[in-house]
Image (cartoon, rainbow, N blue to C red):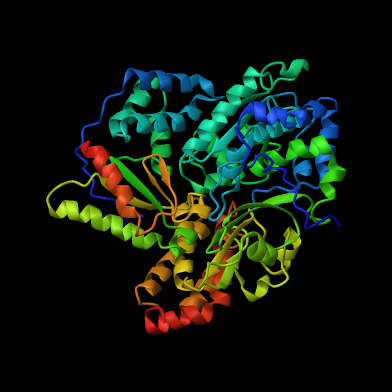
Amino acid sequence: MSEHNHKLNSNEPAPAFTPALRKQIESFLTRYETKRSAILPALHAIQDELGWIADEHVEILDKEFGLHRVQVREALTFYSAYRQKKPRPYHIQFCNNIVCCMLGANEVIDKIKGHIKKFEEKGKESPFGVEGVPCMCVCDGAPAMLVNKDRHLKVTKENIDSILEKYASLKSGV
Amino acid sequence: MGDTLTKVKITTAFEGKPNARALKTYVDNGGYAGLKKAFTMQPGQVIDEVKAAGLRGRGGAGFPTGMKWSFVPKDDKGPKYIICNNDESEPGTFKDRYITECNPHMILEGMIIAGFAIGANKGYIYTRYDFFEEIKWLETAIREAYDAGFLGDNILGTGFKFHIDHYAGAGAYICGEETGLLSSLEGKKGQPKLKPPFPAISGYLHRPTIVNNTETLAAVPWIINHGAAAHKTMGTEKSPGTKLFCLSGRVKRPGVYELPLGYPIEKLINEDAGGMLPGYNIKACIPGGSSAPILTAEELKGLTLDYEAIAAKGSMLGSGAIMIIDDSMSMVELLKVTVDFYHHESCGQCTPCREGTGWLANIMTGIMAGQGKKDDLQRMFEISRNMEGKTICALSDAAAMPTKSIVTKFGAEIADFIERGKRA
């Protein structure tokens, strides 16, 4: 899977928790039967709000919310949903399982990678990053992908360009 | 023997209705009537009714639901839990998502009835995190159910207390396994636990817990409302009722089909789904999610969609995910995708699975790169054999079974690929 990841910037500073995020995490601590059950929702909330989960965030969960850093790190590294590096503005998760592959997923993934490479050749950073992910359980609409939280179905090498262009123009405000 | 041809919509009853997901739509069309009827029965009678209906777990294992419920200790007065396994992730499956889309209240009603039957006061719906829209629909339904008095401390004035909360997974296939799911719900790595004790005795936080698949729970209200006898008029004697089949691949109309168990697979493909797209032929079929051993096109002739008939062909009905593999697909690629998936998803706690899936993936990487060896097929078969029945959960078997079947049934094509170093 890692081959689909774009180059990562490990020196990116960790974004600070917003008051709303703190309040949300606070509510998880007593919502479930055990405090430990708050770990997964807390990590989702951080990622939703800040895009990724930094080492500093794990420390905050430990020191300020009493969620043990070892237990937090255990969840963070076990579950593939969590990103430990800052993603590009549009993070693409493309299904590379059986039906999507049969219907051409790998060709589309290659095309997205080519798109990203063109930016890099000009010395610019592409607004897109792409990774192959296991079955998204929408096989009746294969090939399928997620761009951040937007689900796209029947993505082909013919229509991928127009989908990417739409996001790219959103980014540049055109 | 029930009717195996007439289509009755149970879990997809709200398909295509305007405002399908709203509580009002649900109640106006007989929703929560099953719950009201359950409240006129004794909890033991509810369990007996589900047992008599012959409902079997729709997540893949096909275990009798009523029997599972009856394992919960009746004299235990402490907390008990109902967990809806909505962590749909078996490759090829998309039915639990569809039920959530059609009407999530059916899932809630099934959970409340199950809670009443086993004496639980708390339920969780565990959904895969990337069902972003679906999770919102579930949360809306839960809020509506609280507002209407179907959830809370005194449901419909009966004194029965039941609460439901929602919990999102985090991208781990293994959390579809019931004890892996429970570990995850406890905030831990989603690693399965040794059984026994089974969750019905010691599950979530070591308390009696029933984990049922979404489709299973969604079928419960209808069964209580219409009775076990009505349920048994559909499907086969050993596989009564309807099942959702997720048909995918190059058929004209892929999608979710609710059909009586025992329905002919060729009728589904050729009539309901309109047959194959022009220019494509069926090469093979994976009948029950990617863990199910593959069937050749020849083996589909006369095959019916029930647990027993598919087992007799050496495969399984599983989750009802029918993937039609057409002649454009290389079996080398199919096997590579399959073993890579299980290698990626192995939780790592049992050696035969952690190492075995890795070895299979390595061999397939070699073959794909044109560096396959003549004895690779035999080696994959041997590795698979040594992965079966030796681990805490069934993921290892789920990787071994399709591998063995593909290597056996399509060995010539793979051997040819190894010989040429590429596809013919």
Camera-side residue of B310 and B28: B28
Locate residue A90, reporting x and y percent: 30, 42
Task: Say above or below: B85 vs B280.
Answer: above
Query: At 67% from the left edge and 70% from the top edge, which residue is drawn?
Result: B300
Q: Please indicate, yes or no, whether residue B367 appears anywhere in the rendered image.
A: yes
Q: Quadrant of the C terminus of chain B?
A: bottom left
Q: Residue furthest left?
A: A123
Camera-side residue of B42 and A111: A111
Q: Quadrant of residue B11?
A: top right
Task: Say above or below: B235 vs B122.
Answer: below
Camera-side residue of B153 and B281: B281
Locate residue B387, reporting x and y percent: 56, 63
Residue B406 left/right relative to A68? right
Q: Quadrant of the N terminus of chain B?
A: bottom right
Locate residue B326, reporting x and y percent: 52, 70
Residue A80 left/right relative to A129? right
Camera-side residue of B80 and B197: B80
Locate residue B363, reporting x and y percent: 42, 70
Residue B336 left/right relative to B274? left
Q: Quadrant of residue A67?
A: top left
Q: Please indicate, yes or no, whether residue B168 appears anywhere in the rendered image.
A: no
Q: Residue furthest front?
A: B18
Q: Tally the marks.
A: 0
Task: Say above or below: B158 vs B402.
Answer: above
